[in-house]
Image (tube, rainbow, N blue to C red):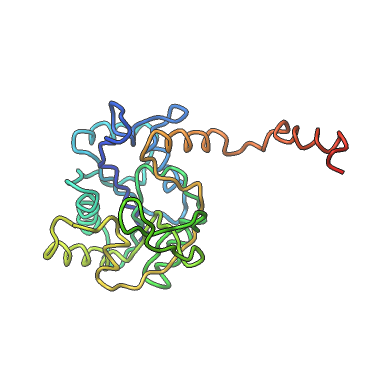
């Protein structure tokens, strides 16, 4: 079985808006629904488990019915942290599906995920036992000594940025959480599933994602994602070339 765990338990405090960011709308559709639809439409996804703020479970249940998201099999309350929320979701999935199932863990506020990336995650878990979606770094990466001094410049060719989904065998990721919670119940220093698994010395396989797979964290992120979704199937407008064409036609470009 291929099961998606979508966690959307955050309150969106950095957005400065009245509702959690996962419920902001793009073209009249909540971001969370946009995210779910990518997996709902994928023919290799069998089921979806949602983890949301407890006070929004009723609203999310209404959205699931409204948009006919019939692959959603459970909606559970989130925890104090993102990792707590993921653990709650894994506990629920464990009740419903075999421990050898593939689990794709995805942010509820990453609404642009290619179908091919989902497929590659599933295939990688079956072959290697894990899949961490990543993208290439396009900026120079540095480490710092303090707030004003550069410590080291990292070789960009050996650096990637982790995205989502981050995918595993259910038994492996569930047992990893159980182990960590015994020694580090607050998940201190563990920011995602990739970090958790590496703390336990697990080998992780890379799946390449893309730049559009953005996580909506700030207002700027929302506006960028909104623009991408609204213009997804549009061509670059012809007037984008006007300056160059004028330059060439003027003879200055010869």
Q: Nearer the viewer, residue 158 or 141?
A: 141
Q: Nearer the viewer, residue 212 or 67?
A: 212
Residue 98 horizontal/vertical position (percent): 27, 64
Q: Which residue is at a point 52% across and 34% down the rendered structure image?
A: 227
Residue 251 image-quadrant placement? top right
Residue 165 horizontal/vertical position (percent): 39, 55
Q: Quadrant of the C terminus?
A: top right
Q: Which residue is at a point 69% across and 33% down the rendered structure image?
A: 237
Horizontal arrangement in the rendering, residue 171 relative to residue 134 (left or right): left
Residue 252 horizontal/vertical position (percent): 84, 38
Q: Quadrant of the N terminus?
A: bottom left
- The mark tally for this picture is 0
Horizontal arrangement in the rendering, residue 149 relative to residue 74 (left or right): right
Residue 228 horizontal/vertical position (percent): 53, 38
Q: Which residue is at a point 50% across and 54% down the rendered structure image?
A: 139
On screen, residue 30 above or below 84: above
Residue 65 image-quadrant placement? top left
Q: Nearer the viewer, residue 86 or 146?
A: 146
On screen, residue 6 above or below 160: above
């Amino acid at each position: 079985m291929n099961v998606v765990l979508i966690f959307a338990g955050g309150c969106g405090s950095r957005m400065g808006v009245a509702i959690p960011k996962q419920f902001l709308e793009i073209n009249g559709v909540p971001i969370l629904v946009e995210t779910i639809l990518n997996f709902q439409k994928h023919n290799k996804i069998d089921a979806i488990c949602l983890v949301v703020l407890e006070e929004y479970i009723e609203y999310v249940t209404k959205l699931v019915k409204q948009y006919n998201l019939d692959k959603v099999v459970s909606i559970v309350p989130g925890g104090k942290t993102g990792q707590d929320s993921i653990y709650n979701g894994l506990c629920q999935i464990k009740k419903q599906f075999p421990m050898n199932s593939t689990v794709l863990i995805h942010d509820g506020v990453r609404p642009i995920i290619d179908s091919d990336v989902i497929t590659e995650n599933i295939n990688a878990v079956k072959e290697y036992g894990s899949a961490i979606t990543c993208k290439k770094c396009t900026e120079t990466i540095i480490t710092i000594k303090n707030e004003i001094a550069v410590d080291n410049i990292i070789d960009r060719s050996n650096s990637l940025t982790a995205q989502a989904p981050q995918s595993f065998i259910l038994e492996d990721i569930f047992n990893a959480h159980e182990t960590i919670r015994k020694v580090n119940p607050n998940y201190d220093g563990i920011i995602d599933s990739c970090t958790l698994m590496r703390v336990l010395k697990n080998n992780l396989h890379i799946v390449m994602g893309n730049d559009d797979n953005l996580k909506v964290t700030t207002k700027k992120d929302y506006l960028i994602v909104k623009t991408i979704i609204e213009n997804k199937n549009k061509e670059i407008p012809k007037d984008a070339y006007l300056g160059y064409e004028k330059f060439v036609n003027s003879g200055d470009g010869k």
